[in-house]
Amino acid sequence: MSSGNPDLETVVEHAREHSDRFQRAVDETSPDRYMMWYSELFLFASLCELTDCDQVIESGRARGVSTLVLSKYFEGSDTNIISIDNRPHSEDAEYAEERLADADNVTLQYGDSREIVPGNAGPKTGVLIDGPKGNAALRLGLDLLGDEVPFVAVHDLHRDTFYRDLSELLFEHRLYTDDETIVDEFGRYDEPYFEWYNSAPETEVEAGPYLKGGERSNSYGPTLGAFFNGIAPYDDRVRRNFEAYIRDQRGPLSDFGDRLRARRASGGPVARRVADFVLSLWE
């Protein structure tokens, strides 16, 4: 990482200093089947503080668990949270609105994050992108780092997948939650989630470290990638090639993929499973 971006030693030290505070935030929330892992959220919250952010923008809220954890963690501070989702009348939106009704430091918005986020982000904003996915997520991250946002974090970047490989080519200053040092320090926060998930009556596949869809994975979990600003936050040549690739890929197949990712993020239980299965074959 470049100077000015937090290195692993600094991140781990911060986590140890604030572990009790994060644990309280976890204890004051209830897990949900569709949520980011706690370890990922703690890393993101730590990076917000280490990069002196006083605003969080969450792109992709779903049922609001991650939003509430962040709200509890930053409670009593000057940090505010803008949480964006693109399905205002979905079942998930209703869950999230009820879950976040008392979260005074959270503002809920609906619409296309690609249009909303750039106008609200600034030099003290940490951005968490959990929707859109894939090409759109990486492109939004590039656009934000091309301005003045100190860092962006993109979810669902498992090892040995196209988008993980692409992110490693694109971004110069990066950190992933499946890094061994991060797993050793943050992984323990996920244990209550695994216990809850695997004991739920509707559970079909086991959740746990180094599992994806019940099968062995080279990544600890879904994986959050954090990408930092700096003198050269991304490779210009790779970005140009990436944007040319996106232009070539637009069409019915790409649109279908975008719809599947939206359904996986915000659909009902059956729709989620179908979308997740199809995308697991695709991605």
Image: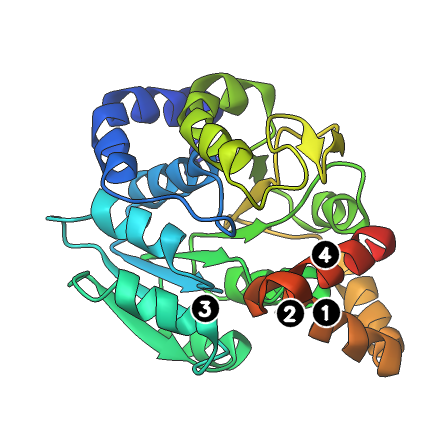
Q: Residue furthest front?
A: 201
Question: Type of residue at label 1?
Answer: Leu
Name the residue carrying label 1.
260
Crowd tier of the residue under label 2, counting other residues whose Cα lies within 10 Å: few below 14, some 14–19, many 20 or above: some
Residue assigned mark 4: 276
Q: CA distance from mark 4 to mark 2?
A: 9 Å
Determine whether label 2 and label 1 are within 8 Å by CB.
yes
Residue at mark 4 to residue at mark 3: CA–CA distance: 17 Å
Colour setup of the view: rainbow
- From this view, report whether residue 175 is shown above or below residue 282: above
| Quadrant of res 223 | top right
Residue type beneath disc 4: Asp
Identify the residue at image location x=65%, y=52%: 234
Query: Where, quadrant-wise, is the N terminus in this rendering?
Result: top right
**Three-letter residue code for mark 3:** Asp
Number of the label disc, if any, that sits on residue 263 = 2
Residue 195: image x %, image y %? 47, 28
User: Looking at the image, do the residues carrying marks 3 and 1 touch, with CB atoms under 8 Å apart?
Assistant: no
**Left or right of 161 on screen, residue 202:** left
In three-dimensional space, the C-alpha distance between marks 1 and 4, rounded to whole angstroms, equals 8 Å
The numbered disc on residue 173 is none
Left or right relative to 226: residue 80 = left
Left or right of 247? Residue 99 is left
Q: Position of residue 272 (x, y in %)?
A: 65, 61
